[in-house]
Image (spheres, rainbow, N blue to C red):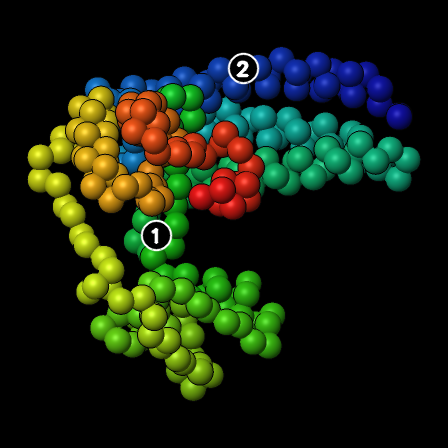
Amino acid sequence: MEDSEQYIYLLNTLKEEISILQNIGDEYFDEIRKIYETNTEAPIKKSLNNFEMTKSRFLENLREKKDIFQGKLADFLNLMMSFNNVIDEEKDKNPEVINFNNHLKMFKAYIDSFKFINSFEDDNYIYWLDINSKRTNVVLTATPLNIAQKLSTVLFDNLDRLVFASATIVVNGNFDYFKKSLGLDEEDCIEAIIKSPFDYDEQMSVYIPSDIQDSENINAFVSDASKFILNILLKTNGKAFILFTSYTMLNQIYYSISKKLKDKGFEVFLHGDKPRSQIIKEF
């Protein structure tokens, strides 16, 4: 390598700056977590809007941290590009140079996404925030309201035929809403609604408890839901497949009622105890 001094200088600078960048990023995302923290152990999901995120006085500190982080991202990108220019002459000899170039492209794509999401300017997108129950992961997301154009470019234009099959794509007895949402051409669609052989009137009952605490209060909700589920299972002699919105809730309710069920002779399965295929077979 011709400019070894520049190489060493940039490499050391990258090592120093990446640590600083991580700390600034942690401060920004930690600020988001603190702002939207709740008094529950449940995951947090919140929609975000342009006025709140760009004008609210309450979020001035967050915007300052965002600007600092965004500026540091741009500085680090320039540093990576300078380093890439120095090592580019070695790309035919060293595959790690190609690898670094790929990471450079990924980092640039991350910055572009970060800037787009945090601008909150495109009304054709919806924006939201996800924070996991352990508060260790904060995710900002933007997704288009209409995915028709994207699906056409990425999927439909590359396939001769495609089958959509689901129990939930019919609205008011037709596929109009589904086709419009996905940008499907009316003339190219062959449709069929296949009636279920299941006798819902005779074989299904719907119970909507009115005395269960809201899931925002996770401990009270788990306690109430456990009693409700236990009561139903005792009446139906088990034979139930119970779904949850999180592994945390699944485990909490399982350990709350499993012993009582086992004491009455029920066999109880917990997702994760055995391979899925084995649990299904035993069930």
Quarter of the rendering containing residue 160: bottom right
Residue beneath label 1, please?
125
Query: Helix or strand or loop: what does disc 2 sit on?
Result: helix
Q: What residue type is labelled 2?
A: Ile
Query: Helix or strand or loop: what does disc 1 sit on?
Result: strand
Q: Is residue 84 left or right of residue 4?
A: left
Foreground tag (2 vs 1): 1
Residue lying at the far bottom in this picture: please name it.
187
Q: Where is residue 249 in the image (x, y as percent from the top left)?
A: 32, 29
Q: In this view, does 78 lie to the left or right of 37?
A: right
Q: Quadrant of the N terminus?
A: top right
> Which residue does the image show at 65% across and 36% down from the upper left?
104
Residue lying at the far front in this picture: please name it.
265
N-term-proximal mark, 2 vs 1: 2
Q: Where is residue 84 in the image (x, y as percent from the top left)?
A: 73, 32
Residue 20's label in the rendered image is 2
